[in-house]
């Protein structure tokens, strides 16, 4: 059985927007500071740590982060 490495859809240092979640910072831009291990290899279970522009941090699923064009 061949093991295929999993590659997350978002990369370290990418600018993203927090969306689709009831959170005080929803709609704000942030930067991905860490990609957490994903044993399931399913994007629905991929977690990221992000840093907002006010230097606060958060821990969010990929489905709540959208690549930013800014």
Image (tube, helix red, strand yellow):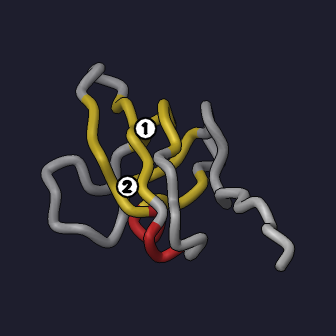
Task: Tell me the tag on residue 56.
Answer: none
Residue 12, image x and y in percent?
Answer: 62, 36
Which mark is first along the chain, 1 or 2? Answer: 2
In the rendered structure, the answer to whether residue 10 lies left or right of residue 21 reads right
Q: Quadrant of residue 51?
A: top left
- The residue pinned by badge 1 equals 30
In the rendered structure, the answer to whether residue 3 lies left or right of residue 30 reads right
Residue 40, image x and y in percent?
Answer: 52, 72
Q: In the rendered image, which quarter contains the C terminus?
A: top right
- The residue pinned by badge 2 equals 18
Does residue 52 lie above or below 45 as drawn? Answer: above
Q: How many marks?
A: 2
In the rendered structure, the answer to whether residue 49 lies left or right of residue 16 reads left
Q: Are marks 2 and 1 in contact (CB under 8 Å)?
A: yes
Does residue 40 lie above or below 27 as drawn? Answer: below
Residue found farthest to the right: 2
Residue plotted at (38% across, 62% down): 61
Nearest the viewer among 61 and 2 is 2
Residue plotted at (50% across, 51% down): 37
Residue 68, image x and y in percent?
Answer: 58, 49
Q: In the rendered image, which quarter contains the N terminus?
A: bottom right
């Amino acid at each position: 059985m061949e093991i295929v490495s999993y590659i997350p859809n978002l990369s370290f240092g990418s600018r993203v927007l927090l969306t689709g979640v009831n959170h005080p910072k929803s709609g704000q831009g942030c930067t991905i500071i860490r990609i957490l291990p994903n044993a399931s290899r399913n994007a629905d279970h991929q977690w990221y740590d992000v840093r907002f522009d006010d230097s606060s941090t958060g821990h969010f699923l990929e489905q709540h982060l959208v690549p930013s064009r800014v």
